[in-house]
Amino acid sequence: MVSTSVFEDRAGAEQSVAKAADFVRDNLAPLLPNPPHVLAGEVVASA
């Protein structure tokens, strides 16, 4: 499973990660053998 998200600021990203973690823990944990790997960084290119 892969998800990509873009946020205006780090606070929005952190809030999204917290909500997603709650959902995964409550609904998907038995289906996922490994914990999620979260990457974060700034967008450095745009078209």
Image: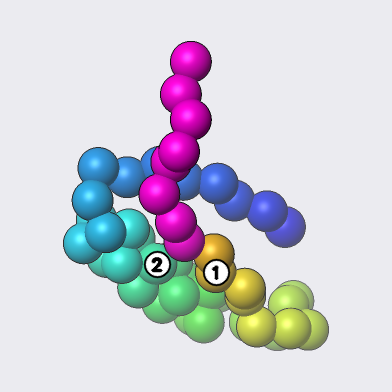
Q: Is residue 32 left or right of residue 10?
A: right
Kind of residue sitting beneath label 1: Val
Q: Secondary structure at mark 1?
A: loop
Q: Is residue 15 left or right of residue 43?
A: left
The chief SS type of the magenta part is loop
**Crowding near the residue tagged with mark 2, few <14, some 14–19, many ≥20 C-alpha atoms within 10 Å:** few
Residue 4's disc number: none
Q: Provide residue 24's location: percent of width, then percent of height.
A: 53, 73
Q: Is residue 44 magenta?
A: yes
Q: Residue furthest front?
A: 44
Q: Is residue 5 magenta?
A: no
Q: Which residues are magenta?
A: 40-47
Q: Is tag 2's residue or tag 1's residue first in the polypeptide sequence?
A: 2
Q: Can see residue 19?
A: no
Residue found at x 47% / y 61%: 40
Please name the residue that numbered disc 1 is placed on. Answer: 38
Kind of residue sitting beneath label 2: Val
Q: Can see residue 45?
A: yes
Please name the residue that numbered disc 2 is placed on. Answer: 17
Q: Mark 1 and mark 2 in contact (Cβ < 8 Å)?
A: yes
In terms of depth relative to the viewer, which is nearer, 40 or 21?
A: 40
